[in-house]
Image (cartoon, helix red, strand yellow):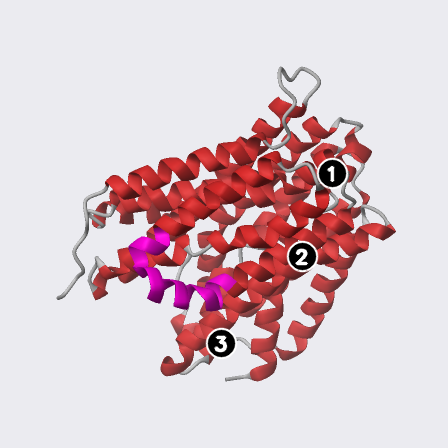
Amino acid sequence: MKRPAVIFILITMMIDAMGIGLIIPVLPDLFQEVGAVNLSTAALWGGALATVFALMQFVFGPVIGGLSDRFGRRPVLLISLVVMALDYLVMAVAGSLWLLFLGRVVGGITSATQATANAYMADVSAPEDRAANFGLIGAAFGIGFVLGPLMGGLLAEFGTRAPFYAAAALSGANAIFGYFVLKETLALKNRRKFEWRRANPLGSFRQLKSLPGLGPLLLVFFIYQVAFSVYPAVWSFFGKERFGWEPSTIGMSLALFGIMLAIVQGGLIRPVLRLLGERGTVIYGHVFDIMAFLALAFVTSGTIALILTPLAALAAVITPALQGIMSKAVGPDAQGELQGALASLTALAMILSPLMMTGTFAAFTGPDALIYFPGAPFVLSALLVLLGLFVFAGRRRLTSFSG
């Protein structure tokens, strides 16, 4: 395995993940600065930007992957980084909401490179090392999710545009690094013609039909992903409206949440599963999440909210426990189909949830709101989780695959 090239891949994935959270802390001030809008309207724009970013990643992920099979991994990754750097520079000087919106469209496309990064990692890894090396990509992505909001919040002290300049510098520097260390791994004889029909992102939803009996669990998984996405969707607007938080505090709170999320899913999940079992863990996670969402909805102290934020991540055992139940219910020849279906449902949730959550926030904080209640999106998430709990409790038990 070529260590410098692998380091480049990991940095690229980290930067991709940072691009999602980097601008979250500055969004309220940025929208009010550029569009002269109130916080409720700014939240609606924030939801639109988050949705279009997720939509572009969903649509162009297979396209970028297909292009890398046609032209090679190296040009696709390097061009994506250069365009990403230029895009951040455009957003740094953008003077209108529509230019920011266009910047997120381009940013979503250029950051849809995880398939190419995985392909490169597969190219340079021995078969027995691939699983562990794919785990490195996941870890780099997780680090980016933590560093993005933290870096965005700290840099906001130098102005709302500082995070964009920093992101442009990171992307540009990594492109230069990659130019010198990244060698092409896809031989000419192994390249295939690019076909649009094979780059269809909706094709992955066909896998749902091949997973009979898992319908209720897939629905629970989707509902939870929608509810859980309330954090990136409205947290910055909620923190500013309810507590008057500055971007640095918003970034720090999201970083704390991300760190606790990694601890829970990387370590605490194991003793919880041993103690409660997979079914009990799913139920515990739902009940805990309902209480956490309701607590955040009604809390009025910023200090208490900061304490609750990492504690809320203790409910994040739901996803791996659900995955464990579903994985045991299908044969070894259907594991890829199951993971593809879950990835598709996660992408769909990331597209729908921001509009739903920011719309709810705007409806309860705008000048025409019948009831002023900034915590309304968290009540909506609590109700969604309660619905998911009912679906899970009422489903027919699945038997484990024993083929």
Considering depth in this image, is 24 or 3 the residue closer to the camera? Answer: 24
Could you say whether the residue bearing mark 3 is in a helix, strand or loop? loop
Amino acid bearing label 1 = Phe
Q: Residues within 10 Å of mark 1 (few under 14, many from 20)?
A: some
Magenta-colored span: 264-282
Amino acid bearing label 3 = Thr
- In the visual, does 171 lie left or right of 340? right
Judged by depth in the image, the label closer to the viewer, 2 or 1, is 1
- In the visual, does 203 lie left or right of 120? left
Is 198 rendered above or below residue 331?
above
Could you say whether the residue bearing mark 1 is in a helix, strand or loop? helix
Is 289 rendered above or below residue 277?
above
In space, the residues marked 2 and 1 are separated at their CA atoms by 22 Å
Could you say whether the residue bearing mark 2 is in a helix, strand or loop? helix
Q: In x, y percent, where is residue 114? A: 51, 61
Residue 265 belongs to magenta span = yes
- In the visual, does 70 lie left or right of 219? right
In space, the residues marked 3 and 1 are separated at their CA atoms by 51 Å
- At 44% from the left and 76% from the top, the residue drawn is 132
Label 3 belongs to which residue? 185
In space, the residues marked 3 and 2 are separated at their CA atoms by 30 Å
Considering depth in this image, is 84 or 234 the residue closer to the camera? Answer: 234
Earlier sequence position, callout 3 versus callout 2: 2
Q: Which mark is residue 243?
A: 1
